Image (cartoon, helix red, strand yellow):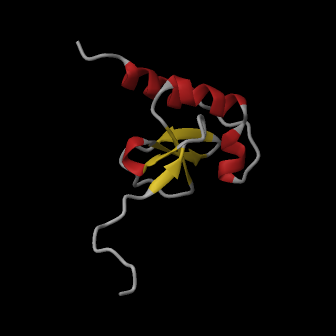
Amino acid sequence: MSGRTHARACPERTCLGCRERAAKGDLLRIVEIEGECVPDPRGTLPGRGAYVHPTLVCLDPAVRRRAFNRAYRARGPFDTTALRQYVERAEQPLQ
């Protein structure tokens, strides 16, 4: 037997903030569009994507360490205000 399994493997990505590997579905994809980091929750926007857990605990260290510059292989700084607002809304408990 070749050692292959018939079960589909769940793709994993590394969070830029905490640097832990997680399932792709558990992370938020972020795309750079004209110097701005834009959240891509559906994962359909074109371009190179970077992944972060959708929490401020992971977003803040990624921004502070300039991890987006390395992930996009481009010079920054990138505007992260829209991304921060999206994550803050996602963290709020449902009422």
Is residue 87 left or right of 57 when viewed as pictured?
left
At x 39% / y 86%, what residue is drawn?
A: 2
Is residue 19 left or right of 22 when viewed as pictured?
right
Q: Residue furthest front?
A: 1
Compared to residue 1, the image places residue 95 above or below, namely above
At x 67% / y 37%, what residue is drawn?
A: 78
Q: Nearer the viewer, residue 1 or 95?
A: 1
Q: Position of residue 17 (x, y in %)?
A: 60, 35
At x 23% / y 12%, what residue is drawn?
A: 95
Q: Residue furthest top?
A: 95
| Tally of marks | 0
At x 47% / y 27%, what residue is drawn?
A: 55
Q: Position of residue 27 (x, y in %)?
A: 44, 42
Q: Nearer the viewer, residue 82 or 95?
A: 95
Question: Residue 73 appears in which quarter of the rendering?
Answer: bottom right
Q: Residue furthest bottom?
A: 1
Q: Position of residue 85 (x, y in %)?
A: 48, 23
Q: Which quarter of the rendered picture does the N terminus lie within?
A: bottom left
Question: Residue 7 appears in which quarter of the rendering?
Answer: bottom left
Q: Residue furthest right?
A: 75
Q: Nearer the viewer, residue 15 or 2?
A: 2
Q: Nearer the viewer, residue 72 or 54?
A: 54
Is residue 55 left or right of 71 when viewed as pictured?
left
